[in-house]
Amino acid sequence: MNKLLTILITFFVTFSYGQVDLADSFNQLFKEEKYDNIIKYKPKKNEDLSAKALYYKGMAHYMKSEDDDAMRYIDLAIEKGPVDFDMFYYKGMLLFYANKFNESLPYFEKAITLLPEEPDFYAGKGEAYYSLGNKDSAIVYFEKASEFPNCKTRVFLLMGEIYLDLKNNENALTAYKTALGQLSQVDDSYQNCLFNLGLIQHLTGRLSEAKETFEKHISVYPTDYHAMAKLIQVYYSLSEFEMALLYKEKLYAAHKTNKLDIGMKEMFCFDQFIWNGKRVMAFENFDEPDDFMFVKHHFFIMDDNGEIAYQIDSESSVAIRINGSKNKYVLCLVKDQSHFTYWQYIFNDNYKYPELKNAVLDILNEKVKPSASFIPGKTNH
């Protein structure tokens, strides 16, 4: 038996109720990560551990991921009393890990009541609400946790994620900047945090900052092709098309060697812009099959729910390509089941993007009429 435990058994027995108060000694063993020593201690028949000693036995099991035993001892500690904030907090955490999020909430609140200046308690309650899908309540507790200087980085990461989902980009930007300042490149969250920071900088029009962030990102993670596509979008927003060309070539090479995941298997987003309050997402297909017709570019006009409302495509068909290299793509508006062709706008592989984008805007603004159309149930021409 451990020498320290032998001393504990000998000297820490009281005579009024036979209570063994090993809390301080268990605390020391806990700090030394000697969890098994705490777990193995068994009180004699006439001995009765104090609430705090029972708590440390529960925490020893907690640290070894033995959650059922941990819960049993912490319940015994709470039942015995006096109860302190740690007992309530870890009871809440055990319920949280058991996916009993609603049941965990009152225990986090009890811990907060006893020690209102501890950020982990607010963070725990925030995570429970977050897991329940209640983002409005979660952000209240994350914000409260963030007011304390020893708030954990994860809180700022979750705040950034929630604010990004809520389209509160300025608060998301602040949260991710704070988190990134606390992370190093070896941290698991660093890559995602850096990516999201660049994403928000782009969305909020901080293009130079977004460029710097994504260039740094790719220098650290050279095979993060999603970040590469975002950098291309930033270059397009800055009209730095030549800078984007190098990374487009890298994406095409990755596509050829099957290195792209399912989200970029067929195409990638190279630009996005706002038209009449609507976001327009410009995509480019990798493949150009030797078929009668294929589409090279999609300009998706998004609705308020982030879904595609309709689109403008650059189509390439045999009828266009038969006229030689000067003609390859014609712009077409596809809405519902109707199809409108604009022969006024024909491009080849040497197109200048500003000209293509202006043509798309002309169609969106109805400055030109379609040359041909197909509308189900109507006479077409």
Image (tube, rainbow, N blue to C red):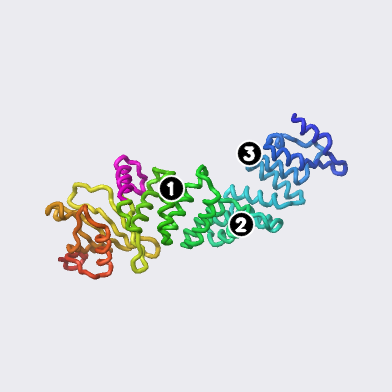
The residue wearing badge 1 is: 217
Real-space CA distance between mark 3 and mark 2, rounded to the nearest whole angstrom: 27 Å
| Left or right relative to 155: residue 22 | right
Real-space CA distance between mark 1 and mark 2, rounded to the nearest whole angstrom: 29 Å
What number is the disc on residue 145? Answer: 2
Discs 1, 2 touching: Cβ within 8 Å: no
Count of residue discs? 3
Q: Amino acid at mark 2?
A: Ala
What number is the disc on residue 64? Answer: 3
Q: Position of residue 155 (x, y in %)?
A: 56, 53
Q: Position of residue 33 (x, y in %)?
A: 67, 37
Discs 3, 1 touching: Cβ within 8 Å: no
Q: Position of residue 42 (x, y in %)?
A: 75, 35
Whether residue 281 appears in magenta in the rendering, the answer is no
| Outermost residue, left side | 323
Q: Amino acid at mark 1?
A: His
| Left or right relative to 152: residue 316 | left
**Dot in front, 3 or 1:** 1
Between discs 1 and 2, the one toward the N terminus: 2
Residue occupying image coordinates x 42% and y 45%: 219
Between discs 3 and 1, the one toward the N terminus: 3
The residue tagged with tag 3: helix, strand or loop?
Answer: loop
Q: Dominant secondary structure of the magenta stretch?
A: helix
Whether residue 261 appears in magenta in the rendering, the answer is yes
Q: Residues within 10 Å of mark 3 (few under 14, many from 20)?
A: few
Between discs 3 and 2, the one toward the N terminus: 3
The residue tagged with tag 2: helix, strand or loop?
Answer: helix
Q: Amino acid at mark 3?
A: Lys
The residue tagged with tag 1: helix, strand or loop?
Answer: helix
Q: Nearer the viewer, residue 289 or 152?
A: 152
